[in-house]
Image (spheres, rainbow, N blue to C red):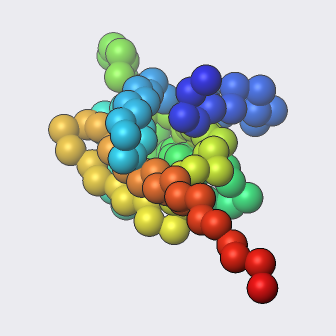
Amino acid sequence: NSWLQEIVDDKTSLTQRNSNVISTEHFVEIQIETTGLTKEDVIIDMQDGILSVSYDHKDVEQVQYTQQQIFIDSFINKYKLKNNMDQDNISATMLNGLLYIKIPKIKKKTASKIKIT
């Protein structure tokens, strides 16, 4: 029973980046590994309750590596947000190779009695 569910049956051929999900009483935070990327490289999109985080790698210059262990490939991570998450107030920051996406939780409405007239 996670506060949000990562979509793993996505049919795209893109890989996913490693991520962490932290849930508190007031918000959910997603941390996604973005080593080697800038905030201008990453696209965050919200549509139909699905939060998508992606990067489209375009080879501008073909480099002939002698050794290559760092790969900055295209990726897409998708998360289905639950009903108690405030989709209108999502914020994101990047720091030290991690993208932090903070999603506030909607406070539970208290029950109220309605008087019959």
Residue 78: image location, x then y, percent: 62, 40
Q: Residue furthest bottom?
A: 117
* Identity of the residue drawn at 52% across and 53% down: 108
Nearest to the observer: residue 15 or residue 79: 79
Quadrant placement of the C terminus: bottom right
Farthest left residue in view: 96
Q: Quadrant of the N terminus?
A: top right
Is 78 located above or below residue 2 in the figure?
Answer: below
Relative to 114, say whether 4 is above or below. above
Residue nearest the observer in this picture, 29 or 98: 29
Residue at 19% across, 38% down: 96
Is residue 105 visible in the rendered structure shown here?
Answer: yes
Q: Does the image show residue 42? A: no
Quarter of the image where one finds residue 37: top left
Q: 48 or 85: nearer the eye?
A: 85
Horizontal relation, residue 107 to residue 113: left or right: left
Q: Which residue extends farthest front?
A: 117
| Residue 22 spot, x, y in % from top left | 38, 31
Instruction: Identify the residue at image location x=29%, y=53%.
Output: 93
Residue 34 place in picture, x, y as percent = 36, 37
Percent x, y of residue 9? 77, 26
Q: Residue at x 69, y 26 (%)?
A: 8
Q: Nearer the viewer, residue 106 or 87?
A: 106
| Left or right: where 117 falls relative to 26 | right
Q: Quadrant of residue 97?
A: top left
Q: How many marks?
A: 0
In the rendered view, does 97 fall on the left or right side of 49? left
